[in-house]
Image (tube, rainbow, N blue to C red):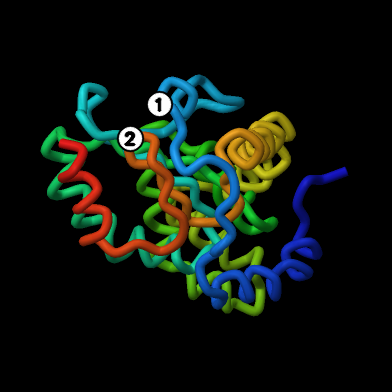
Amino acid sequence: MPLFTRRQFAATALIAGLFAAAPAFAQDEGPSEVPMDQLMAPGPIPDHALGSEDAPVTIVEYASMSCSHCADFHNETYPKLKEQYIDTGKVRFVFREFPIDAAAFAIAMTARCAPEDRYFDIIDLFFEHQLDWIRAEDHYGAILDLAKQAGFSEESFEACLQNQELFDGLTARRDKASKEFGVHGTPTFFINGEKLVGARSFDEIKAKIEAAL
């Protein structure tokens, strides 16, 4: 049985729209800080990261592609973070998928099916156009159109979405984050192990980074 179909996307389009319009998740259970060796231990699927491996500060973000506050962070705050801290060797940024619906799963899978050096380009593309694909009448078609912009054919996109091993890996990552690190909503950040839940301004994140340098 296919993992994703157009019918499934149509059924979850409203759900994705509700998540996009909702406030940041406020539930904050579990530890307020996680030891770095535990947080950075190899997980069910490999991490994608930017910045020096020797950076004094590591930021781990758990995000869903259909989360509006995650899109706000990546469209507004992340460029400043990258310019001032990631590109200067002060911060290593680790992006971990925490999909909350079928669309978020599909986009995370699409990014992982692309060449390794295109991963963050695809994440950026889908966050930049989040309102377009969430509000589209044909949810599946809108995501496919963006995937084509990123170099996929319809056949390669659909083949990616039927990758059971990848789907299982993303599910296992989400479950591990929830059970071990107390991640219950998006975005959730860990700055050198300290957990920050929900939408955060650049100034808030900057203050945490500067305190850790």
Q: Nearer the viewer, residue 126 or 71?
A: 71
- The disc labelled 2 sits on which kind of residue? Asn
Which residue is farthest right? Answer: 1
Rendered residue at 13%/48% (across/down): 84
Q: Nearer the viewer, residue 157 or 52?
A: 52
128 lies left or right of 46: left
Rendered residue at 15%/33% (across/down): 89
Q: Secondary structure at mark 2?
A: loop
Residue 109 position, x and y percent, is 59, 43
Where residue 140 is drawn, which disc sits there?
none
Q: Secondary structure at mark 1?
A: helix
Rendered residue at 66%/73% (across/down): 138
Residue 36 vertical placement versus 151 (above, below):
above
Residue 93: which quarter of the image? top left
Kindly report the distance in space between the C-alpha atoms of the residues bearing marks 1 and 2.
7 Å
132 lies left or right of 156: left
Residue 95: which quarter of the image? top left
Q: Earlier in the sequence, mark 1 or mark 2?
A: 1
How busy is the neighbourhood of tag 2: few (under 14 within 10 Å), some, or many (20 plus)?
many
The reply to whether the C-beta atoms of the residues labelled 1 and 2 are less than 8 Å apart is yes
Residue, disc 2: 192
Residue 66 position, x and y percent, is 55, 62
Q: How many marks?
A: 2
- The image quadrant where one finds the N terminus is top right
Rendered residue at 45%/66% (across/down): 69
Residue, disc 1: 36
How busy is the neighbourhood of tag 1: few (under 14 within 10 Å), some, or many (20 plus)?
some
Residue 47 position, x and y percent, is 46, 30
